[in-house]
Image: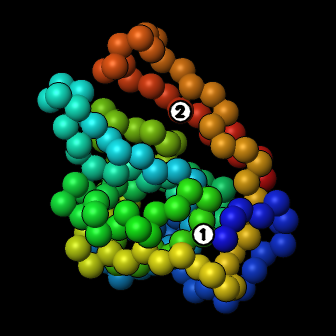
Amino acid sequence: MSFSSSPIPQTGVRHSNFESLHLGRSSQSIAVGLLRFWDSLNFEKDNEFMDITVLFLDENLYFVIYGIIPVGRANHYMSSLKDGSIVKVYRFEVSMCSSMYTITDHSFLIRFIPPTIIDEVITGAPEINLIRLFDNFQGSDLTKETTRVVIRLLIDP
């Protein structure tokens, strides 16, 4: 399933949106667009694999939030991750973003925990109006591999 350019909402998928998320572990679920995912590496420890970072787009409010799949669960979820897919994520933990590592403007992040389930939505998927992906990158010294980089997404309603 890919993102749609049609603003017509679809029905059939019961879920929460990012505005209704609350901190902690819960049985809440979200239906989202899976924008991108990548391996996060620790450059100070010989590029040690730390986790998979995932960018999600909320279909109702056009917020972007990121998720973290820990290294110990990465193999379990890899087959469920597909850029541009519409997915439903169940039973996860919502945490506050660290001020040291913030890649979206949203103050929360989604942590995958052992009971977390991610399923691609095949029928009755919400429509997500995605104008474009990464709009620009900025950083003070992009030649250093440890420089903090800001990724700004421009998403028009």
Name the residue nearer the viewer: 15 or 4: 4
Q: Amino acid at mark 2?
A: Ile
The answer to whether residue 60 is seen in the rendering is no
Identify the image quadrant of the N terminus. bottom right
- On the rendered structure, is 7 left or right of 29? right
Secondary element type, mark 1: strand
Residue 75's place in the image compared with 147, above or below, is below
Q: Mark 2 = which residue?
A: 151
Q: Residues within 10 Å of mark 2 (few under 14, many from 20)?
A: some
| Residue for point 58% across, 86% down | 14
Q: Residues within 10 Å of mark 1 (few under 14, many from 20)?
A: many
- On the rendered structure, is 138 left or right of 69? right
Q: Position of residue 58 (x, y in %)?
A: 60, 62
| Residue for point 45% across, 14% down | 142
Q: Position of residue 29 (x, y in %)?
A: 46, 78
State the separation of the CA atoms marked 2 and 1.
Answer: 22 Å
Q: Position of residue 94 (x, y in %)?
A: 34, 63
- Quadrant of residue 42 within the rendered picture: top left
Q: Mark 1 = which residue?
A: 86
Secondary element type, mark 2: strand
Q: Amino acid at mark 1?
A: Ile
Mark 2 or 1, nearer chain start: 1
Q: Give residue 51's mark.
A: none
